[in-house]
């Protein structure tokens, strides 16, 4: 079997050792950072392994917006559009638009229609 090369810690239960453990396990792309819209590299101090950190945005996560902030389908769709438009208007290249979507939230028929 093929080992995963990308990692997102379930439930954002990250510890101070998560990145190091991921690097030792051969992970090449890490999705646990929510601090930027631009990918960046991290070098593990224990192994010297380099990992690409791809931003994960809680501002576009369906669970955060629909389940926690109680947005309806149209509000959720508008928020995603606003997020993409804002990033596109900013100077620079290499930004990531992360759309964290779950089948039981954004994948419902009414929300899919709005998207």
Image (cartoon, grey):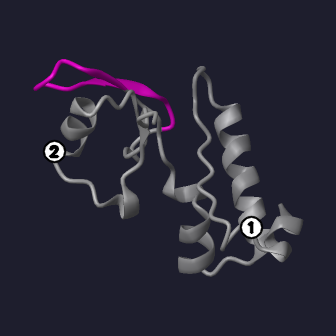
In the image, is residue 102 above or below residue 105?
A: above
Quadrant placement of the N terminus: top left
- Identify which residue is drawn at 46% across, 33% down: 2
Return the residue at label 1. Answer: 107
Q: Is mark 2 on a helix, strand or loop?
A: loop
Q: Point out residue 43 in the picture as x, y percentages from the top left corner.
A: 24, 22
Residue drawn at (70%, 33%), measured in percent from left and top? 88
Helix, strand or loop: magenta stretch:
loop
Quadrant assignment, res 105: bottom right
Please determine whether, in this image, residue 35 is positioned above or below residue 2: below
**Is residue 93 placed above or below 17 in the rendered structure?**
above
Q: Which residue lies furthest to the left in this view?
A: 46
Residue range (magenta): 37-51
Secondary structure at numbered mark 1: loop
In the rendered image, which quarter is residue 72 located in?
bottom right
Q: Quadrant of residue 19?
A: top left
Q: Which residue is situated farthest in the front direction here?
A: 1
Which residue is at the front of the view, 96 or 93? 96
Residue for point 63% across, 51% down: 99
- Left or right, 80 with reference to 51: right
Q: How crowded is mark 2: few (under 14 residues within 10 Å), some or many (20 or more)?
A: few
Please tell me whether residue 46 belongs to the stretch shown in magenta.
yes
Q: For this view, does 59 lie left or right of residue 32?
A: right
How far apart marks 2 and 1 lie (CA) works out to 33 Å
- In this image, 82 relative to 54: left or right? right
What residue does disc 2 label? 17
Q: Residue at x 41, y 48 (%)?
A: 8
Q: Position of residue 60 (x, y in %)?
A: 60, 56
Mark 1, Cα crowd under 10 Å, few <14 / some 14-19 / many 20+, is some
């Amino acid at each position: 079997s093929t080992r995963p090369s990308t990692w997102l810690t379930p439930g954002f239960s990250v510890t101070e050792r998560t990145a190091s453990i991921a690097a030792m396990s051969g992970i090449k792309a890490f999705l646990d950072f929510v601090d930027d819209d631009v990918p960046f590299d991290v070098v593990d101090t224990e192994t010297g392994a380099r990992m690409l950190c791809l931003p994960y945005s809680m501002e576009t996560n369906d669970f955060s917006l629909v389940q926690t902030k109680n947005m309806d389908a149209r509000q959720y769709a508008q928020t995603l559009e606003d997020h993409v438009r804002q990033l596109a208007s900013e100077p620079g290249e290499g930004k990531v638009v992360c759309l964290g979507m779950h089948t039981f939230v954004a994948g419902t028929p009414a929300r899919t229609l709005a998207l």
